[in-house]
Amino acid sequence: MGQAAKVLQLFRTLHRTRRQVFKNDPRALEARIKINEEFKSNKSETSPKKIEELMKIGSDVELLLRTSVIQGIHTDHNTLKLVPRKDLLLENVPYCDTPTQKQ
C-alpha cells in the first residue's frame, strides 16, 4: 500500500473513531475540524521520515481515543453519568489481599 493510501486510511480511521467515541455529543464531534486542520497543514509534507512521524502521532491519537476516552453526561449540577462503550468494558479480575507465591 502506498504512503498516500496509508495517510488516507488513517484520516478515515480517525474520523470513524471520533464519530464512535463522541456519539451524541455535537460539541465534541467538532473534533472533525481539528483533524481536518492537522491533515491540511501537513498536506505538502514530502519528507518520508516526517510523514512516518506524523502517521505515528495520528495512530497514537486514534488508539488513545478508542481505548481511553469515556463520555460523561451532565445529569445534575455536580453529577456526571458515565457512558462507557462496550469495547471499553473488560472482565473484572478479582483482587487478592494475600497473594500466594508461585512454586
Image (cartoon, grey):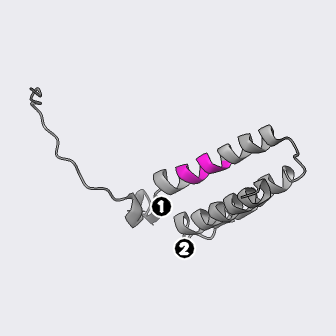
Where is the N terminus found, in terms of image quarters?
A: bottom right
Disc 2: which residue = 24
Q: Are marks 2 and 1 in contact (CB under 8 Å)?
A: yes
Q: Is residue 60 left or right of residue 32?
A: left
Name the quadrant containing residue 83: bottom left
Query: In the rendered image, which quarter is residue 8 located in?
Result: bottom right
Furthest residue toward front: 1
Q: Main secondary structure of the magenta part?
A: helix
Residue 60 falls within the magenta-colored stretch: yes
- Give the residue at x 17% y 41%: 95
For the image, the number of numbered tags is 2
Name the residue type under label 2: Asn
> Is 62 or 56 nearer to us in this picture?
56
Q: Vertical placement of 94 versus 84: above or below?
A: above
Quarter holding the C terminus is: top left
Element carrying mark 1: strand
Q: Which residue is mark 1?
A: 71
Can residue 32 be seen from the camera position used here? yes
Residue plotted at (12% across, 33% down):
97
* Nearer-the-camera pick, 4 or 91: 4
State the image coordinates of residue 20 (x, y, percent, origin top left). 54, 68
Q: Residue 53: x, y in percent?
A: 72, 40
User: Which one is nearer the viewer's eye here, 85 or 10?
Assistant: 10
- In percent of width and height, residue 88 lies at 39, 58
Residues shaded magenta: 58-64
Residue type for callout 1: Gln
Figure quadrant of residue 34: bottom right
Using a 10 Å C-alpha cutoff, classify the residue at mark 1 as few (fewer than 14 neighbours), some (14 to 19) or many (20 or more).
some
Q: Which mark is residue 63?
A: none
